[in-house]
């Protein structure tokens, strides 16, 4: 019974996701659970579960007094957010690498391992972005630049839906663990400039892939 229910929910996820990505459902459009359930010939329960999963992917938003809507996405916002992230995060990492302790590196490795495990489990998708953010912040904290650190936290929060989209839909999961492993190795070896170059590539590469998805939604 649980296998059948999970399969039904996943089918609903795929149908709604395709409607959003194809532009059949526009950004800001309400997603009425009753109407979707009737259209897909299912109960509201798998629809509700599907919308929650799509929220984790950054394609659906839940708003007070409005319910679920398709997320409005902006390629210009992606460009600005990720370029700001690249500048600030690279500056923090450059300052942090010489100050990273064994405890800092061990904490980052634990988070990297947790991410690698979570990537193998579809039902853990909602935690991917959270673990990703914690991993990066663990490396930056040693810079002891509280204002810059706070700004980066705000940027990561604002770009969260795009980070989720990259991990879920743009192949980010396949790239994330190898890149995080290499970044951690460079930090451990004290190769500051190489680590910063990789981080810049990591962030701006993700931006380019997310913008391709956003552009496809606008066509």
Image: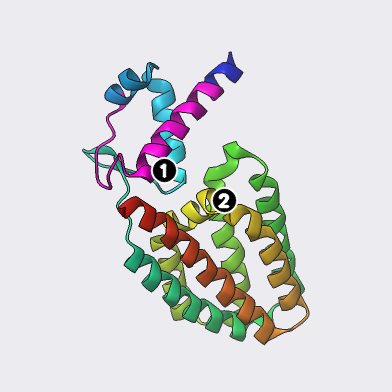
Most foreground residue, 92 or 205: 205
Most foreground residue, 24 or 141: 24
Which span of residues is magenta-colored?
A: 6-33
In contact (CB < 8 Å): disc 1 and disc 2: no
CA gap, disc 1 and disc 2:
13 Å
Residue farthest along the top direction in this orientation: 1
Whole-percent x, y for residue 3 in the image: 60, 19
Neighbourhood count class around disc 2 (C-alpha, 10 Å): few under 14, some 14–19, many 20 upward: many
Where is residue 188, by image quadrant?
A: bottom right
Query: What residue does disc 1 label?
Result: 55
Q: Is mark 2 on a helix, strand or loop?
A: helix
Q: Quadrant of the N terminus?
A: top right
Q: Which of marks 1 and 2 is nearer the N terminus?
A: 1
Decide if residue 140 is in sight here. Answer: no
Q: Give the residue displayed 22% in from the left and 38% down from the top.
A: 66
Residue 128: mark: 2
Where is residue 54, by image quadrant?
A: top left
Decide if residue 22 is in sight here. Answer: yes
Whole-percent x, y for residue 58 in the image: 42, 49
Q: Give the residue displayed 64% in from the left and 59% down from the top.
A: 175
């Amino acid at each position: 019974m649980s296998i059948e229910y999970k399969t039904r929910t996943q089918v609903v996820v795929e149908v709604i996701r395709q409607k959003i990505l194809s532009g059949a459902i526009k950004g800001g459009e309400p997603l009425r659970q009753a109407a979707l359930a009737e259209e897909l010939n299912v109960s509201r329960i798998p629809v509700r579960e599907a919308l929650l999963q799509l929220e984790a992917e950054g394609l659906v938003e839940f708003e007070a007094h409005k319910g679920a809507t398709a997320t409005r996405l902006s390629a210009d916002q992606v460009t600005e957010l990720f370029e700001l992230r690249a500048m600030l995060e690279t500056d923090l990492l450059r300052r942090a690498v010489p100050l990273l302790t064994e405890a800092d590196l061990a904490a980052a490795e634990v988070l990297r391992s947790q991410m690698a495990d979570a990537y193998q489990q579809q039902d853990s998708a909602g935690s991917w972005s959270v673990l990703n953010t914690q991993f990066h912040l663990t490396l930056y904290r040693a810079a002891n630049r509280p204002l810059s650190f706070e700004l980066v936290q705000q940027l990561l929060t604002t770009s969260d839906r795009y980070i989720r989209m990259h991990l879920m839909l743009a192949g980010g999961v396949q790239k994330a663990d190898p890149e995080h492993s290499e970044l951690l190795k460079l930090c451990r070896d004290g190769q500051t400039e190489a680590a910063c170059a990789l981080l810049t590539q990591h962030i701006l590469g993700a931006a380019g892939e997310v913008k391709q998805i956003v552009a496809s939604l606008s066509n």
